[in-house]
Image (cartoon, helix red, strand yellow):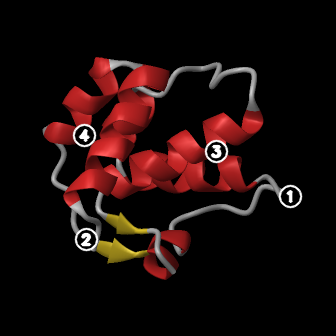
Amino acid sequence: MLTVEELDAAYDRVKTEWGMEILREVYYTDCKPMTFKEFLTHCTACGGNWGGMLLSGIEELYPLVYDEIPEHLGYDGNQAFFTIVALLQLLKVDTSE
């Protein structure tokens, strides 16, 4: 379980990188808590592209949230990956495993 500070950091990262529209969609989405292992069963392997694989799980489980993710995630792949992880945390996926 995330602390308030960790949730605030995830919220701030997603807001800064992708804007308020996606956070609004997360707010209105019925997110059921799940482990990272459970989440991965909804993902499609993308040839070692972990970001793409995680995005495929978001698309399957939360299509309206996925639709708000910008087409271009940014220039820095690491920053985009960590923003995806922050989004998963806001969607109640336990990324601590």
Marks 1/4 in contact by CB < 8 Å: the verdict is: no
- Residue carrying label 1: 47
At label 2, the amino acid type is Pro
At label 1, the amino acid type is Gly
Mark with earlier residue (2, 4): 4
User: Callout 2 environment at 10 Å: few (<14), some (14 to 19), or many (20+)?
Assistant: some
Picture quadrant where residue 10 is located = top left
- List x then y, in percent, for residue 56: 58, 51
* Spatial separation of the CA atoms under disc 4 and disc 3: 18 Å
Q: Say what secondary structure mark 1 lies in.
A: loop
* Spatial separation of the CA atoms under disc 2 and disc 1: 27 Å
At label 4, the amino acid type is Val
* Spatial separation of the CA atoms under disc 3 and disc 2: 21 Å
- List x then y, in percent, for residue 38: 44, 79
> Looking at the picture, does residue 16 appear above or below residue 83?
above
Mark with earlier residue (3, 2): 2
Mark with earlier residue (1, 3): 1
Marks 2/4 in contact by CB < 8 Å: the verdict is: no
> Looking at the picture, does residue 25 appear above or below residue 85?
above
- Residue carrying label 2: 33
> Looking at the picture, does residue 11 appear above or below residue 21?
below
Mark with earlier residue (2, 1): 2
Mark with earlier residue (4, 3): 4
Residue occupying image coordinates x 29% and y 62%:
92
- Residue carrying label 4: 26
- Residue carrying label 3: 81
User: Callout 4 environment at 10 Å: few (<14), some (14 to 19), or many (20+)?
Assistant: some
